[in-house]
Image (tube, grey):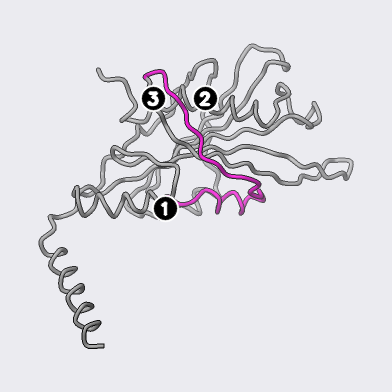
Amino acid sequence: MILRAFILLALCGMTVLLCRLSPPVKGGNEAGVLAELPMVAGSFVGETETPSDKERELLPADTIIVKRVYRTPGRSVAQRDQAHASLVIAGHDRRSIHRPEVCLDGQGWTLVGSQVRTVKLLSGQELSVRDLAIAREVLLNDGRKLLVRAHYVYWYVGADVSTPSNLERQLLTFRDNVLRNVNHRWAYPSVMARVTQGLPPEMSGERIRSDEETVTMLLELVRTLAPKFQKNLMPAL
């Protein structure tokens, strides 16, 4: 018992000493992303979306939210794709950044599957993202219920790092605070699209896409989008 008490006391003393000797933490004012999404991304053209009142209500007031809906214009319905993209950047209140699964659940989506996928960029760099397979029931006008499936792809971006894992984000926050004197101003980009296979034509308005085709389309959008706003992926000038 005496030995355990001594070890605990020593650990507490070391913690206090490290806190006193550590340099002041940087304010985290500079995000690792630009606060904008490009109008054009490959074959997609983006139209600005306004954050909903619910999003504004749930997130701290100094949170930056940028949204666009991307479409492939001038194509027939059989070739048309659509995806929603958003970029959330934390303010001083770090509650802006959280696990998207929480919000999706609040919107009626059920998590069906989750996996990390690798996006190979044109520069040769690789970006790891998390792909959530989600589903929810909607009530049609004729009273029937229809299961709508979708994929939600996201990742976290710090000052000069990125990760698809919320746990790793927290570990990077602690590590870089202590060892690098960096306080990350985290952001999380995301893209989302429905699986249109099985949807009534009047409800879809897009080409028929399976799960796999929807994921492929979203990852291609990420491949084009990410280097245009994520600073550590942007081409050197």
* Amino acid type, label 2: Leu
Image coords of residue 48 (percent x, y): 51, 29
Q: Reply yes or no: does residue 200 show up in magenta.
A: no
Instruction: Give the number of the mark in front: 1 or 2.
Output: 1
**x, y percent for residue 115:** 55, 41
Label 2: how many Cα within 10 Å (few below 14, some 14–19, many 20+):
some
Which one is earlier in the sequence, the residue at label 1 or at label 2?
Answer: 1
Per the rendered image, the range of residues in magenta is 95-123
Q: Is residue 213 left or right of residue 141?
A: left
Of the 4 image quadrants, the one containing the C terminus is top left
Q: Which mark is residue 227?
A: 3
For residue 51, side relative to residue 163 (left or right): right
Q: Which residue is mark 1?
A: 167
Name which residue lies at 29% across and 37% down.
Answer: 160
Report crowding for label 3: few under 14, some 14 to 19, many 20 or more residues within 10 A (C-alpha).
some
Give the tally of numbered discs.
3
Residue type, numbered disc 1: Leu
Q: Of discs 3 and 1, which sits in the foreground?
A: 1
Left or right of 90 on screen, residue 149: right
Which mark is on residue 221? 2
Q: Residue furthest left?
A: 21
Describe the element under mark 3 as helix, strand or loop.
helix
Tell me which label, 3 or 2, sits earlier in the chain. 2
The structure residue drawn at horizontal position 83% and vertical position 41%, both measured from the top left corner, is: 140
Crowding at dot 1, Cα within 10 Å, few <14 / some 14-19 / many 20+, comes out as: few
Q: Pinpoint residue 169: horizontal percent, then vertical percent.
A: 37, 49
Query: Hey, what amino acid is under mark 3?
Result: Pro
User: Do labels 3 and 1 touch, CB within 8 Å?
Assistant: no
Image quadrant occupied by the N terminus: bottom left
Q: What residue appears at the point 46 percent right and 52 percent down from the top-left corner? A: 98
Q: Residue 178 location in percent, x, y?
A: 21, 54
Q: Earlier in the sequence, mark 3 or mark 1?
A: 1
